[in-house]
Image: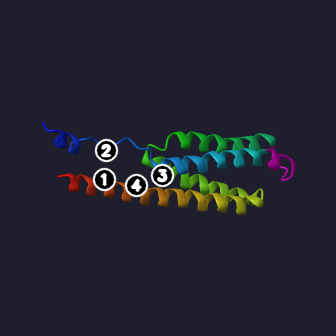
Amino acid sequence: MSGEQAATDAPVPAERSPRRGMAAAVLSLEAITLGLTTPVMITIADVDTGLALAVGLGLAVVCVLLAGMLRAEWAYAAGYVVQVAAVALGFVVPVMFGLGAVFAVLWTTADLLGRKIERERAAAWAAWREEQQ
């Protein structure tokens, strides 16, 4: 096997997924925001403490768990469900209509832009491999 042959058979370097990285960052920041809605629900919106803890901290934990599960495609769909829940939290804490919408836009952008980057990266590697033959 010649050195040139070995170079063309080289595997694609392991690269981090930009989609997963951006989406995990959005979910991590959103977890903080959703966790901080708990005291707001208790003190300002007069929501029962148990319910506020379950909703606010529950959504925050879901965000953290989803951020770690983004290797699976279903986790991205679940991320969209979290975005809907964050916006819906605006019925209890009105400012969450705005914050939830911001995070929904960030989530959608991370997902779509990440997919585009991954497609273009795969096409570039395919073109490079074709060029090496």
Label 3 Cα crowd, 10 Å radius (few <14 / some 14-19 / many 20+): many
Label disc, if present, on residue 12 of the rendered structure: 2
Check disc 4 and report the residue beneath it.
Answer: 118
Q: Residue shown at 54%/50% (left/top)? A: 23
Check disc 1 and report the residue beneath it.
Answer: 125
Residues tagged 3 and 1 counted as in contact (Cβ below 8 A): no
Judge from the rendering whether residue 13 lies leftward or rightward of residue 100; answer left or right. Answer: left
Q: Quadrant of residue 14?
A: top left
Tell me the CA gap for discs 4 and 3.
8 Å
Q: Is residue 46 magenta?
A: yes
Q: Earlier in the sequence, mark 1 or mark 2?
A: 2
Judge from the rendering whether residue 19 lies leftward or rightward of residue 103; answer left or right. Answer: left
| Observer-nearest of 114 and 128 | 128
For the magenta stretch, what is the residue range?
A: 39-48
Tell me the CA gap for discs 3 and 1.
17 Å
Amino acid type for the residue under numbered disc 3: Arg
Q: Position of residue 132 (x, y in %)?
A: 21, 52
How many numbered callouts? 4
Q: Secondary structure at mark 4?
A: helix
Tell me the CA gap for discs 1 and 2.
8 Å
**Can you say whether 109 is above or below 76 in the image?**
below
